[in-house]
Amino acid sequence: MSVDALPLRDIKPLLPIPDLSFYMLLGVGVAAVAAVAALLVFGTKLWRMFRNQDPRFAWLERLERMDMNRPKETAYTMSRYGRLLAKEKRQKEIMAELEARLERYKYRQEVPPLDEETKRYIKLFIEMTRDAL
């Protein structure tokens, strides 16, 4: 028997193989972009949480949120946090003047509203402290 006379069995035509490499690359790219976006969001939240680690920022925020229409609370809050925040010579001078002015709003049952000069001193101190931080 010759080689040409042998019947061919089991040989099938080549099957087409689907090429999914483009879709796989696209999926990896989308996953990478999503991972970078998640890291940015998480990193931003962490940064916001830990950037105010310095308590002076919290004290300054507390002073900025004071209600000037409540003179007794304003006097106590300003005295407490103002002493902590006053670091420079000029701030200490203003704080000493403020403490003298705020003394009449403390230790009494009924207190008058804050006068405009005291409010200006408080605003000046807050502004100077904000610039110093």
Image (cartoon, rainbow, N blue to C red):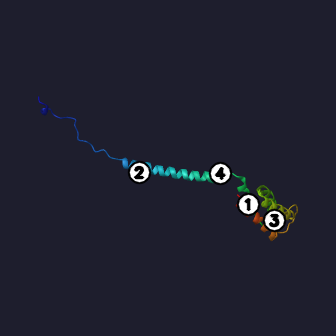
The mark that comes first in sequence, 3 or 4, is 4
Helix, strand or loop status at disc 4:
helix
Residue drawn where x is 78% and y is 55% of the image: 84
Amino acid type at image mark 4: Phe
Residue 72: percent from left, percent from top? 82, 63
Q: In the rendered view, does 84 fall on the left or right side of 40?
A: right
Residue drawn where x is 37% and y is 49% of the image: 22
Task: Tell me how far mark 2 sits from mark 1, CA to CA.
Answer: 52 Å
Amino acid type at image mark 1: Thr
Which residue is tagged 3? 71
The mark that comes first in sequence, 2 or 1, is 2
The residue most toward the top is: 1
Q: Residues within 10 Å of mark 1 (few under 14, many from 20)?
A: some
Task: Tell me how far mark 3 sits from mark 1, CA to CA.
Answer: 21 Å
Which residue is tagged 1? 129
Helix, strand or loop status at disc 2:
helix
Task: Tell me how far mark 1 sits from mark 4, CA to CA.
Answer: 21 Å
Residue 50 image label: 4
Task: Tell me how far mark 2 sits from mark 3, CA to CA.
Answer: 63 Å
Quarter containing the N terminus: top left
Helix, strand or loop status at disc 1:
helix
Residue 26 image label: 2
